[in-house]
Amino acid sequence: MQIYLVRHAIAEERGGAFVDAERPLTLDGIERFERAVRGLAKLRIEFDIAFHSPWRRAVETAQRLAPLLGSGGRVETDELARPPSRALLRMLEGERPAVVGHQPWLGELAAWLCTGDRSLGSGFALKKGGVCFLEGEPVPGGAVLRALWTPRTLRRLA
């Protein structure tokens, strides 16, 4: 299984006009992430399904993955709006799922899948719009880190 962890793109700042869960992507965030998606396309990355947090910035990011998404569509789950859990691991399916969410939880998920230890999550820091590519099984310690792409790297590939 190839698992792609995708941090949401650049969103409106905290403490502004929006409640945290309702913060939308900025216009710059949208433009930059769409270029990053074109970079993923150049790498021939495709997803069977995209799981995403219900928070607006993750929903909007997942929507922009549409050019890379197969017939599995998008699945919204509250499991991506909190620290990673066994329930989240059980729901991951397909050969190439994308998982769109937030830091520090995505870092914790990457650490848990690669090492079996969620507390090592700070070692897997994803920038906004960045992608972490893991290969293996969605069980603690069952995956290997294959790539950690910054959004800038993906945009340059486009």
Image (cartoon, helix red, strand yellow):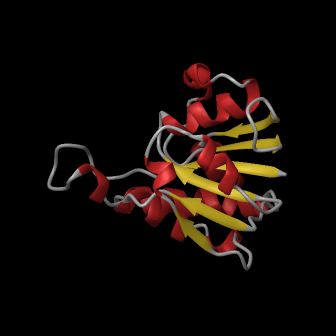
Extreme residue in the bottom direction: 71
The x, y position of residue 62, in whole percent, is 54, 64
Q: Quadrant of the C terminus?
A: bottom right
Tell whether 88 sits left or right of 63: right
- For the point 74% across and 75% down, the residue is 70
Depth check, front residue: 39 or 148: 148
Depth check, front residue: 132 or 157: 132
The image quadrant of residue 92 is bottom right
The x, y position of residue 110, in whole percent, is 66, 35
Question: Is residue 116 among what the camera can see?
Answer: yes
The image quadrant of residue 42 is bottom right
Q: How many marks?
A: 0
Would you place residue 16 above or below residue 57 in this image? above
The x, y position of residue 151, in whole percent, is 58, 46
The x, y position of residue 146, in whole percent, is 81, 37
- For the point 77% across and 65% down, the residue is 46
- For the point 57% across and 20% down, the residue is 119
Question: Is residue 23 among what the camera can see?
Answer: no
Tell whether 83 sits left or right of 18: right
Would you place residue 132 above or below residue 35 in this image? above
